[in-house]
Image: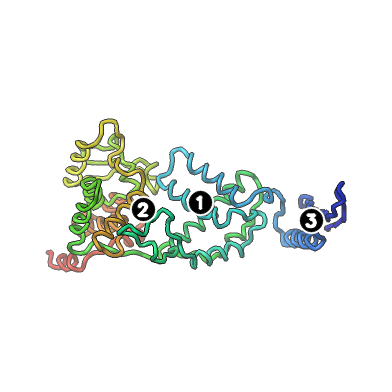
Amino acid sequence: MATIQKKQTPKGTTYWEVRVRRRGSPAMSKSFKTEREAKAWANKQEHAIDEGKRVTRAAEKFVVADAIDAYIHEVDTEIPRLATADKKIGDLRSVRVDLGEFSIAGLSREDVKNYLKQLAKTQIPPPATKKKTHPLYNGDTPKFYSPATIRKFYYALKQALQWHARTKRYYLDPELFIDQKVPSGWSGQRDRRLKLGEEERLYASIDKARTKKEEWKRLIRFALETAMRDQEMLKARWVDLDLGNRTLTIPKEHSKTRDKRHIPLSSKAVEILETQRALCPKREARIFYSWANAACVSHGFRRIVLRAKLENLKFHDLRHEATSRLFEKGNLSTMDIMKITGHTELSTIERYTHLHPKELAKKLDLD
């Protein structure tokens, strides 16, 4: 039963002290400025105990920002470092901006639910560094968070709070993440492929760039030959390349699925790598060293696409295109292609495979 006592500080300030004692639950106490707040807190704790919930005040010492900051440090320093660490850290920082000041003990299931709803309505502000005078500026075009991004933010929050609760050994209300309406990761499934002449238009657009003209062409051609992810290409090292056997090894720490795999290289891919090696500085460990990370590639590719006046084309769509081309060759089984691309489930690779009707028609005439 809860007891509430009116007390005074040495300076004469009045406050109310609450004590909650129940057999089988730890004793709790807390002070409030008003009697109304004291009664509300006492009723909440007693109600939780009556429902069989484990009640503790340890979580009251932390806000959501504390959990996210600690989890970011864990992700950033993990050995081996995940290939997706940078993206996960970016998601965590976005969540921190919105929910960082919430008390973990006071965070409710309704708060999480409202956060998901608000994200779907939130317009993404354009970067402050963008200049309207730039010929490729499109910052005035309204953008909203995609269902896949909202889903990533939700699971980033869930993982951070659950990890922090385990690490600091406090109770986290499991109802926070029960029956939440999380958007499907594939609700905005893409089926974008390069149309006739679009690859040539990309290269023509690159010719108008100021720098990295040949580097961009080699990167795009290599992506279309191997179906590798952008992170995998940027982290690929010369020590993992075996030109004699025409294979490139992706270590598990550089793979999204954390599985080591060996990528067979076509003659065109080998030719690209030989050219890249001839131009690469001697002490450079990475093959595609011209870009620091995937964000640089994404940003630069967007400029190329805008200059080429192409619509709705992203760098990751080149992986879709490359995977579909592997199927269109007709001499590789689905399992062979999955080993090349690194997909682990048939349902996943189907989403990346969009065969041109023209190529399917050709197969009908094969004996």
161 and 122: which is toward the camera: 122
For residue 320, which quarter of the picture? bottom left
For residue 52, which quarter of the picture? bottom right
Instruction: Name the residue beneath numbered marker 1.
Output: 93
Distance from disc 2 to disc 3, alpha carbons, whole Å, reads 55 Å
Distance from disc 3 to disc 1, alpha carbons, whole Å, reads 32 Å
Mark 3 crowd level (few <14, some 14–19, many ≥20, 10 Å Cα): some
Total numbered labels placed on residues in the image: 3
Q: Amino acid at mark 3?
A: Phe
Instruction: Name the residue beneath numbered marker 3.
Output: 32
Q: Closer to the camera: disc 2 or disc 3?
A: 3
For residue 233, which quarter of the picture? top left
Residue 85 image position (x, y, % from top left): 44, 46
- Which residue lies most toward the top here? 283
State which tag comes first along the sequence, 3 or 1.
3
Indicate the secondary structure of the residue bearing disc 1: helix
Mark 1 crowd level (few <14, some 14–19, many ≥20, 10 Å Cα): some
Q: Closer to the camera: disc 2 or disc 1?
A: 1
Residue at 85% x, 52% y: name it: 13
Q: Amino acid at mark 2?
A: Thr
Instruction: Give the quadrant of the N terminus.
Output: bottom right
Q: Which mark is residue 344?
A: 2
Residue at 83% x, 55% y: name it: 15
- 142 relative to 209, above or below: below
